[in-house]
Image: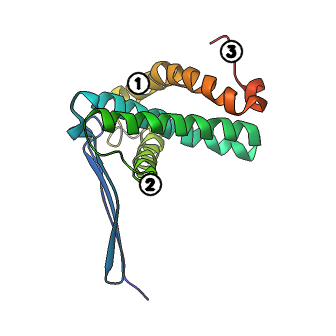
Amino acid sequence: MMPFALDIKLPLLSKLSAVTLSIVIGSSSLSYAEIDIDTLGSQSTMAEQGAICASFSALMENQVLINQNLGDLWSERRKFSGAVIRRAVELAGLESPSSEDIDVLINDYRERLLLNLSTNDEARASSQYQSDIQNIIRTNCASLYVQADKAILRRFPKLAYLINEND
């Protein structure tokens, strides 16, 4: 059996830092992604909000099990939010991250959202953090999704029935 090691460095709940995922299989090591939000300076807030919105969208994509079109809508919203992360990195003067790099960051945030928003264990999540994240989803993400929906409707008009155009 081949040795397997997984090394994940996660930031503190309220402070973001580098996200590194390394997988070691046998003697080879592959490093898949590193987006260090702390190095983005004034663009770090934009990247963090994009990551939160994209991770929420990724969670909502599971609605594909109930309604294919609804899952597709959330998938497109995730992609739009991921583009916000890419743009924040570029505006910070850094090399544009790959789609894989962005997906790793989104997956990391998704796991943290699940863990911290679904637990009642005070040692694992603070109620202030939960409240802050819920507020970002209700305000910033809702606003981002309105922008995304305009672009989505141009590409996928069949999804119009799912979008409340009064927002």
Q: Secondary structure at mark 3?
A: loop
Q: Secondary structure at mark 2?
A: helix
Name the kind of residue labelled 2 in the image: Glu
Image side of residue 137 versus residue 95, left or right: right
Q: Which image quadrant for residue 156?
A: top right
Tell me: residue 49, above or below residue 142: below
Spatial distance from mark 2 to mark 1, Cα to Cα? 30 Å
Q: Which image quadrant for residue 51?
A: top left
Q: Position of residue 79 (x, y in %)?
A: 54, 40
Residue sitting at x 48%, y 43%: 114
- The residue identified by callout 3 is 165
Residue sitting at x 58%, y 20%: 146
- The residue identified by callout 2 is 100
Q: Nearer the viewer, mark 1 or mark 3?
A: 3
Tell me: residue 80, above or below residue 144: below
* Dot 1 crowding, Cα within 10 Å, few <14, some 14–19, many 20+: few
Residue sitting at x 46%, y 37%: 83
Q: Secondary structure at mark 1?
A: helix
Q: Which mark is residue 131?
A: 1
Image side of residue 102 versus residue 67, left or right: left
Q: Is residue 126 visible?
A: no
